[in-house]
Image: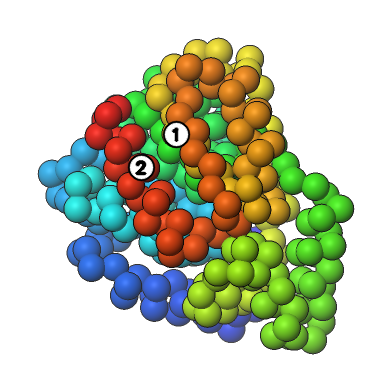
């Protein structure tokens, strides 16, 4: 069977950190496996039992609880469904599916149908934002409203800058396990604000997995011609992967009057202070549109 992990020991380390991260949530956590046309998907279910349904997708090359923790403030009001993205670190099947066609929309359709959810709100950070854009392109009628945080699928940062500031230190880290190299990557990703636990997880994923290198397809206006849901896009001006200034310009052409835009001086991983602002932004947006 194909695996994204380089060793069983490495996989165990990452899944142990997954379980450790879950202890940070105050909410009761339900867990189940849903069979989809692409394979088995592990889903975390938490929040208000009778709350409106809210799907939250994880960031890519990460574990679900890390980016899910950015939105803990929503658990009091909404019933959250957070699937481990198939083909990424976590408990879902490890076969990768294309982020360039309708595959992720079909995967989401299977999950929504399983939970008998016809239409709901979605939140997606990074790669998860790119998944939402695939849903918007192929299944727009299932989105009530959407929040994209530092999203993939709109515009990319400078390849030269990513090679210099992320790829080269990653190579050194993989060769010699240099703590300095890992810290350099963490600082670039978070604008010097990443906590030690997240840094350790990122390091283990770099070391023990084959990273997903295919980012979600850059979305076109033609693909979104039938998409009319209100959409909040939150970006960081210091984001090395998806720079806020480029994302802001591109989204205005893609989403027009359906767009609400927030831009902060933050990296790809928000700081604790920025997460407080993002929490306020999202709560206000959902109150108005959901």
| Residue 40 sits above or below residue 116 on the image | below
- State if disc 2 and disc 1 touch (CB < 8 Å): yes
Q: Residue at x 39, y 51 (%)?
A: 277
Distance from disc 1 to disc 2, alpha carbons, whole Å, reads 8 Å
Query: How many C-alpha atoms fall within 10 Å of the one at disc 1: few (<14), some, or many (≥20)?
Result: many
Residue found at the very far front of the displayed protein: 265
In the image, 60: left or right of 212? left
- Where in the figure is residue 52, as x and y percent of width and height? 21, 38
* Image location of residue 62, percent across then percent down: 55, 62
Residue 202 vertical placement versus 244 (above, below) = below
Q: Residue at x 44, y 17 (%)?
A: 228
Question: In this figure, which residue is indicated by the disc labeled 2?
Answer: 282
- Per the image, label 2 sits on a secondary structure element best described as helix
On the image, the x and y values in percent for residue 167 come to: 80, 64
- State which quadrant residue 31 falls in: bottom left
Location of mark 1 (residue): 232
Using a 10 Å C-alpha cutoff, classify the residue at mark 2 as few (fewer than 14 neighbours), some (14 to 19) or many (20 or more): many
| SS for dot 1 | strand
**Quarter of the image holding residue 88?**
bottom right
Q: Is residue 124 visible?
A: yes
């Amino acid at each position: 069977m194909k695996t994204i992990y380089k060793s069983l020991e490495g996989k165990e380390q990452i899944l142990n950190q997954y379980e450790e991260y879950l202890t940070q949530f105050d909410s009761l956590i339900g867990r189940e496996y849903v069979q989809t046309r692409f394979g088995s998907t592990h889903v975390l279910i938490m929040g208000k039992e009778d709350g409106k349904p809210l799907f939250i997708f994880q960031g890519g090359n990460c574990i679900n609880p890390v980016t899910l923790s950015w939105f803990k403030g929503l658990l009091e009001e909404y019933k959250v469904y957070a699937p481990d993205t198939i083909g990424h670190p976590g408990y879902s099947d490890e076969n990768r599916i294309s982020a360039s066609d309708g595959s992720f929309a079909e995967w989401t359709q299977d999950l929504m149908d399983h939970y008998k959810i016809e239409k709901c709100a979605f939140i997606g950070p990074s790669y998860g934002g790119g998944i939402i854009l695939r849903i918007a392109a192929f299944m727009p009628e299932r989105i009530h409203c959407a929040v994209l945080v530092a999203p993939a699928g709109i515009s990319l940062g400078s390849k030269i800058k990513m090679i210099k500031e992320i790829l080269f230190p990653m190579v050194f880290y993989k060769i010699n396990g240099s703590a300095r190299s890992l810290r350099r990557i963490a600082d670039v990703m978070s604008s010097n604000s990443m906590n030690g636990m997240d840094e350790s997880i990122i390091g283990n994923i770099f070391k023990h997995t084959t990273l997903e290198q295919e980012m979600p397809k850059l979305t076109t206006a033609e693909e979104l011609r039938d998409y009319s849901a209100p959409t909040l896009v939150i970006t960081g001006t210091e984001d090395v992967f998806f720079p806020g200034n480029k994302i802001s310009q591109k989204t205005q052409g893609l989403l027009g009057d359906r767009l609400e835009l927030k831009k902060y001086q933050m990296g790809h991983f928000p700081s604790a202070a920025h997460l407080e602002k993002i929490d306020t932004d999202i709560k206000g947006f959902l109150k108005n549109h959901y």
